[in-house]
Amino acid sequence: MIAKDLMSKGENILAEAGRANARFDSRTLFMSVTGLDNTGLLMSQREQVSSGTYEAYMELIHRRAAGEPLQHITGEQGFMGLTFKVGPSVLIPRPETELLVEEALEILRSEYGKDEAAAPGILDICTGSGAIGIAVKKLLPEAEVTLSDISAEALETAGVNAGLNECKVELVESDMFSALEGREFHMILCNPPYISDAEIETLDEEVRDHEPRTALSGGTDGLDFYRIIAREAADHIEAGGWLLMEIGYDQGESVPALMQNMGDTRVLKDLNGLDRVVIVHRR
Ligand code: GLN
């Protein structure tokens, strides 16, 4: 069989299984098996595939057809133009989260852009794969970035990702702020688990059954982690510093209300017009 026909076969299996991006996924899995990039894929459309490649590819297609996330099969996800290793112990970085990183960089560059000596201390709490903090460090190398997570497994993945992206960061295993006693940062970044218990059951099965519950669940009303942040974050942010959090589409009022005493709050919408990021400028 030639590559092109094998990919069509894969696409059909995925489409029949109800996978939305069957064509994209079938090609991505082919590239994953063969190690080809986009150009290589285009050039080898008419080449015969070996039986080894055929079997390895079909195995991935069947895993994907059964609902395993594409990123768990390929083991990676792009975020802010960088590649991150992902697996079942971390949330797969989402494109919406890039808004938080872009906004953080804009604030930091406007404050520090002209002063090369300054080194803002930044904490990415609930770091998971490390995507947020590592992207900030990569795009603003003078920042001193700390990544923290309650999960040792997640933190290990974050460490691997820092290495892959050639970033020097600090890793701290911590249940929210518990191991960060006495530490102050210029900016705290956080994409906490924020899905309510009731809503978790309604999530797409790919997310619900494959991504870590601890990275999704924000308790009964989804606000558990924002309450901890509202209570404790101010002790860890310098006066005049910043707190940027991702929120769920329906938390654009509840989360700023919780943060009122900390400073001035602002809500940003994502590309779909949904409330997505809350910015607090600490007084
Ligand atoms: N900080 C990580 C991300 O945004 C993980 C977030 C989480 O696990 N809730 O991708």
Image: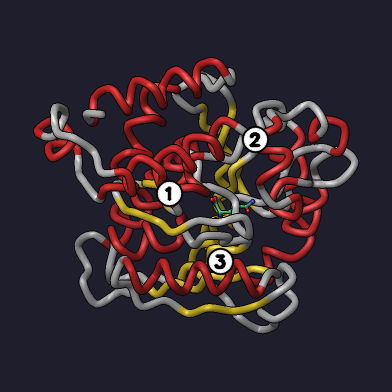
Residue in the foreground of this view, choosing between 158 and 142: 158
Labels 2 & 3 near each other (Cβ < 8 A): no
In this rendering, the label closer to the viewer, 2 or 3: 2
Q: Amino acid at mark 1?
A: Thr
Real-space Cα separation, disc 3 to disc 1, in angstroms: 43 Å
Q: Amino acid at mark 3?
A: Ala
**Element assignment for label 1:** helix
Q: Position of residue 66 (x, y in %)?
A: 62, 33
Real-space Cα separation, disc 2 to disc 3, in angstroms: 42 Å
Number of numbered discs on residues? 3
Q: Which residue is mark 1?
A: 74
Real-space Cα separation, disc 2 to disc 1, in angstroms: 15 Å
Q: Indicate whether 37 appears above or below 89.
A: above
Q: Position of residue 188 (x, y in %)?
A: 55, 61
In this rendering, the label closer to the viewer, 3 or 1: 1
Residue in the foreground of this view, choosing between 193 and 265: 193
Residue at point 28%, 22% (across, down): 5
Query: N-terminal of the two: label 3 or label 1?
Result: 1
**Element assignment for label 2:** helix
Q: Is residue 42 visible?
A: yes
Q: Which residue is mark 3?
A: 239
In the picture, the disc for residue 206 is 2
Q: Quadrant of the N terminus?
A: top left
